[in-house]
Image (cartoon, coloured by chain):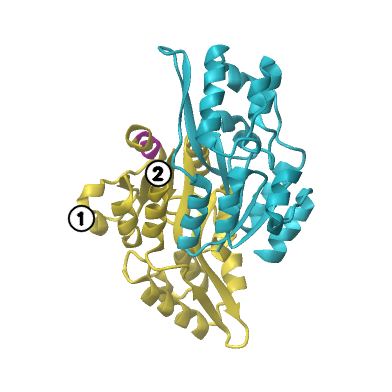
Chain colours: A yellow, B cyan
Amino acid sequence: MKVVCLDMEGVLTPEIWQHVAKRTQIKELNLTTRDVKDYRELMDRRLDICAAHDVTLEKIQAYITELDVFEGARDMIDWIRERYQLIILSDTFAEFADHFMKQLGRPSLFCHNISYNPATKRLEYSLRQDNAKAKAVAAMRSLNLRTCAAGDSYNDIHMLKEADVATFFRAPANIRGEFPQYGNLQAYDELKDFIHRSL
Amino acid sequence: MKVVCLDMEGVLTPEIWQHVAKRTQIKELNLTTRDVKDYRELMDRRLDICAAHDVTLEKIQAYITELDVFEGARDMIDWIRERYQLIILSDTFAEFADHFMKQLGRPSLFCHNISYNPATKRLEYSLRQDNAKAKAVAAMRSLNLRTCAAGDSYNDIHMLKEADVATFFRAPANIRGEFPQYGNLQAYDELKDFIHRSL
């Protein structure tokens, strides 16, 4: 059996925090894992900013519902699911991703959790584990599932390394330059072709 | 994050080999994992019988399309997928299960593979790994996913033991008697309630 492991933001959906930055007009929230490699450091900074500006989970969830998955994303994952298994591996939070998962027909998603603590007026996140994407791919391989991974960012590198076959998808130039071995696909048809040929 | 691991045959769908036995009128094909505990032994016997009676993969797949998933199964798994992650863990073959997966909205499925060798005129199966269901649950737990498992047969016992919480679903009396610790649920609403309360 074969399983495709896809990153969510940047591959299937817009970047959530960039939209929150735009809607709240808080420029500092534009930072992503493309800019800050340590995810805990990035999240701690984001949540400090949210606390300072009274950005609650409810507000973020409302902003997220204004977004749609990328054009063609649903068709592409339907194509994958008719042929292979699919697990979306993301460093987002289940409470953020739910809107997109509904649009995508509820594929399997392994990510983290976040909640709002009304007592402290702060968002609190819980990372399921460090290096979660790579560990998930390693777990799939331990089950004798052949794995294909695609992502676009620093937090995908270990997942790409762990997978049997891997590719960047719409990765920015600085990351592509650091890891040229993962190529860079731009269109869903190219990704389908890559999966079909290599998995 | 929380993941529900469900057996397929007997829990979501009819038993495939029992239907093949009925349609081919080969009584010996009625044996299931409920009767023969060693799955390789059971499959070897089934494939010897198929070879003797010229039962091909194409014929079996045609018989399977005559079957529907159990009434209420799709609604139940949709309910699960809105709230948790879902992986179907089955000792069936992807080439058999495809018809049911389509009816169920393509949930994730970890199982085995089978093919027909026209040269030998025999079906040939490839088990992804021994004790595959239990190993899949253990892999999920290693990812800090809290796991709930439900099954009905001998090949589910190790999976039930490995999971954080577990229950039989429509298990026959002889198996329930051997493993009374797993209770036995009969209706999907009971299973939903069990998942909601215990996971």
Return the x and y of residue B149 as percentages of the image width and height: 62, 54
Residue B66, by quadrant, is top right
Are circles 1 and 2 on residues that touch, CB within 8 Å?
Answer: no
Q: Are marks 1 and 2 on the same chain?
A: yes
Residue A190 is a magenta residue: yes
For the residues labelled 1 and 2, the Cα–Cα distance comes to 32 Å
- Write down the chain letter for disc 2: A
SS majority, magenta: helix
Residue B55, by quadrant, is top right
Check the picture and name the quadrant holding the C terminus of chain B.
Answer: bottom right
Q: Secondary structure at mark 1?
A: helix
* Residue B57 at least partly seen: no
Residue A69, above or below B124: below
Residue A191, by quadrant, is top left
Check the picture and name the quadrant holding the N terminus of chain B.
Answer: bottom right
Return the x and y of residue A31 as percentages of the image width and height: 37, 70
Q: Residue at x 53, y 38 (%)?
A: A78
Q: Secondary structure at mark 2?
A: loop
Q: Earlier in the sequence, mark 1 or mark 2?
A: 2
The residues colored magenta run: A189-193
- Write down the chain letter for disc 1: A
Residue tagged by mark 1? A177
Residue type pointed to by label 1: Gly
Residue tagged by mark 2? A144
Return the x and y of residue B122 as percentages of the image width and height: 47, 17
Q: Residue at x 45, y 59 (%)?
A: A90
In the image, B59 versus B80, the foreground residue is B59
Q: Residue at x 54, y 38 (%)?
A: B38
Q: Residue at x 69, y 25 (%)?
A: B19
